[in-house]
Amino acid sequence: MAPLPDAVQIAPSILSADFAALGDAITCVQPVADLLHVDVMDGHFVPNLTIGPPVVAAINRHTAMTLDCHLMMTNPGDFLDAFARAGADWVSVHVEVDATADLLKEMRGLGLGAGLAINPETPYEAIEPWLGQLDHVLVMTVHPGFGGQAFMSDVVPKLRRIATTVARGERPVIVEVDGGIDVHTIGQTAAAGARCFVAGNAVFRAPDPAAAVGDLRRAAETAIAAEVGG
Ligand code: DX5
Ligand code: ZN
């Protein structure tokens, strides 16, 4: 069953894990996390290179976790089928890449959870027309390309606007945030309407990654309770 859109979901980003011990890192967060965030970078859309379908397939053999694949790619359409076959569950393509309608249609056809990611500098108006058709929307709170960057609080008004539009719609779209999320920053994104939280350094660079997931969840839930109560 799909999770309720209002439930808090924590998605550790393996970009901050030790790639030489990736299986162990996943095993550690698997019992406590909701999704596994997989950052795919093409060296073109972003100035970094990471992983592709063969690694997603290996991860999929290792874990039953829901794989949340964030495609920071200029040409995601060339690889959607490969990611679906590798075992991706959710896929986000960037709204800054053209052919959004075709990409969403193809994601649906492949049975993938269909998401759109939006960069910090991209205006709300670019994503507004698509919000009613998504399974999730990935709001970047850093410039994509690297883990461990500082949270950009100036994105929060746009996040709130996106979450407000989603809440008024009929479709249960999950609002996900990505970049610089830790116990200090997660609250403001939860209060603004985010319910799914990607965290790389805050999880995998913590002494106890599983405990860090719990700390993030509690911080988000506390902020949501204060927002609802207040
Ligand atoms: C950045 C990636 C993020 C990154 C987040 O381009 O999309 O998912 O792994 O890492 P932290 O949480 O360390 O900012
Ligand atoms: Zn990401």
Image (cartoon, rainbow, N blue to C red):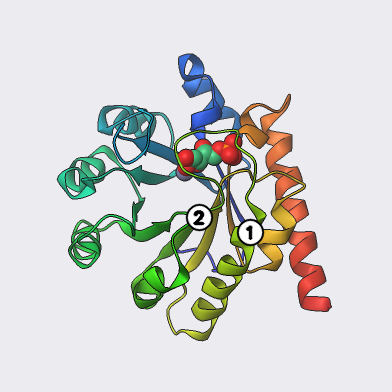
Q: Is residue 210 left or right of residue 39?
A: right
Please tell me in which quadrant of the rendered image residue 82 appears: top left
Please tell me in which quadrant of the rendered image residue 46 appears: top left
Q: Is residue 130 left or right of residue 123?
A: left
Q: Is mark 1 within 8 Å of ligand 1?
A: no
Q: Is residue 180 left or right of residue 169?
A: right
For the residue pair 71 and 69, the one nearer the viewer reads as 71
Q: Residue at x 24, y 46 (%)?
A: 84
Q: Is mark 2 within 8 Å of ligand 1?
A: no
Q: Which mark, by number, is residue 120?
A: 2
Q: Is residue 101 left or right of residue 177?
A: left
Neighbor class of circle 1 (other Cα within 10 Å; few <14, some 14-19, many 20+) is few
Relative to 55, residue 86 above or below: below
Q: Residue at x 42, y 38 (%)?
A: 39
| Quadrant in which the C terminus is drawn | bottom right
Task: Find out whether the residues at labels 2 and 1 contact each other: C-beta distance under 8 Å.
Answer: yes
Q: Which mark, by number, is residue 4?
A: none
Relative to 127, residue 37 above or below: above
Q: Residue furthest top?
A: 20
Q: Residue at x 29, y 36 (%)?
A: 44
**Position of residue 57 measured from the top left corner of the image (x, y, whole percent):** 30, 32
Q: Residue at x 77, y 73 (%)?
A: 227
The residue at which mark 1 appears reads as: 154
| Quadrant in which the N terminus is drawn | bottom left
For the residue pair 155 and 174, the one nearer the viewer reads as 155
**Mark 2–mark 1 distance (CA, rounded to whole Å):** 8 Å
Q: Amino acid at mark 1?
A: Asp
Q: Tag 1 or tag 2, which sits nearer the N-term?
A: 2
**Position of residue 98 measured from the top left corner of the image (x, y, whole percent):** 23, 59
**Position of residue 191 measured from the top left corner of the image (x, y, whole percent):** 71, 67
Helix or strand or loop: what does disc 1 sit on? helix
